């Protein structure tokens, strides 16, 4: 299950329409609306600086938030749209969707690696190269994992870890159909250099042989 779902603090917006939205922006807020969940849409305001900080941090559109509005029960939401100023590229409106516990949502889930000491390739000096530190999964809102685990036991130099080799939480599935790579164990840089030198030497020898024969 998810460890901590980040809070997103908002205030209920009095009034709707362009006038109320313009006033919110003058007061340092970004107007928005929360919809879905079988209840009426709720106009809200989010502090401009807070929203901008979260947008710059990345993954805003695929992060599950715990929306806190004073005087109302907390609700889980995910962003479904951010409108921006066409000139300044700053947020001017945000759309949030309420999620039921059974709702399906696409989220980026962190990948954790275990049993490095049981990987022969790493013992030999191989390097664990992480291709995807996060994997986008379709998960149920009530059962969001805080990470997925990759077991490195028995992996050797040259081995790769693909999504099909990872045990995913119940109800979760990748959003990408193909069997993509999450990580691999590559040879140590010294060994790669030695291999390249050996390959160059063998090519030179083959070239000399061809020259001699001709």
Image: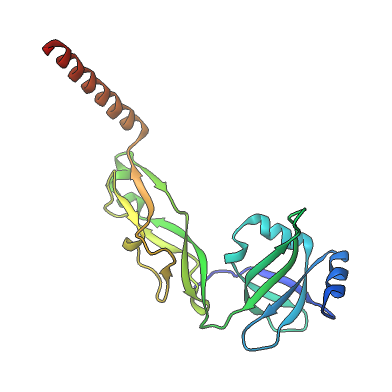
Of 20 and 59, which appears nearest the observer? Answer: 20
Residue 50 lies, with reference to residue 77, above or below; the image says above
In percent of width and height, residue 152 lies at 33, 54
In percent of width and height, residue 92 lies at 76, 64
In percent of width and height, residue 153 lies at 30, 55
Of 101 and 128, which appears nearest the observer? Answer: 101
Locate residue 22: give its quadrant. bottom right
Residue 53 lies, with reference to residue 173, above or below; the image says above
Locate residue 64: give its quadrant. bottom right
Q: Kindly identify the residue that appears in the image at 82 percent across and 79 percent down.
A: 16
Q: Is residue 131 left or right of residue 100?
A: left
Of 50 and 122, which appears nearest the observer? Answer: 50
Q: Kindly identify the residue that appears in the image at 37 percent across and 59 percent down.
A: 150
Outermost residue to the left: 213
Which quarter of the image is occupied by the C terminus? Answer: top left
Tell me which colouring the rendered structure shows. Answer: rainbow
Of 74 and 31, which appears nearest the observer? Answer: 31
Q: Kindly identify the residue that appears in the image at 78 percent across and 62 percent down.
A: 48
């Amino acid at each position: 299950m998810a460890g901590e779902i980040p809070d997103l603090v908002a205030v209920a917006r009095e009034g709707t329409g362009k006038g109320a939205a313009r006033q919110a922006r003058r007061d340092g807020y970004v107007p928005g609306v929360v919809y879905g969940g079988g209840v009426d849409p709720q106009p809200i305001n989010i502090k401009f600086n807070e929203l901008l900080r979260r947008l710059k941090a990345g993954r805003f559109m695929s992060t599950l938030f715990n929306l806190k509005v004073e005087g109302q029960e907390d609700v889980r939401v995910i962003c479904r749209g951010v409108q921006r100023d066409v000139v300044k590229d700053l947020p001017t409106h945000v759309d949030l969707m309420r999620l039921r516990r059974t709702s399906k949502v696409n989220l980026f889930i962190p990948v954790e690696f275990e049993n490095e000491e049981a990987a022969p390739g790493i013992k030999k000096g191989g390097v664990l190269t992480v291709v995807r530190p996060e994997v986008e999964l379709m998960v149920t809102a009530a059962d969001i994992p805080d990470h997925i685990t990759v077991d490195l036991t028995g992996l050797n130099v040259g081995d790769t870890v693909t999504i099909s080799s990872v045990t995913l939480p119940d109800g979760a599935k990748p959003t990408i159909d193909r069997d993509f790579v999450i990580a691999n164990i590559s040879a140590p840089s010294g060994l790669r250099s030695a291999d390249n030198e050996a390959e160059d030497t063998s090519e030179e020898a083959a070239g000399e042989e061809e020259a001699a024969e001709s």
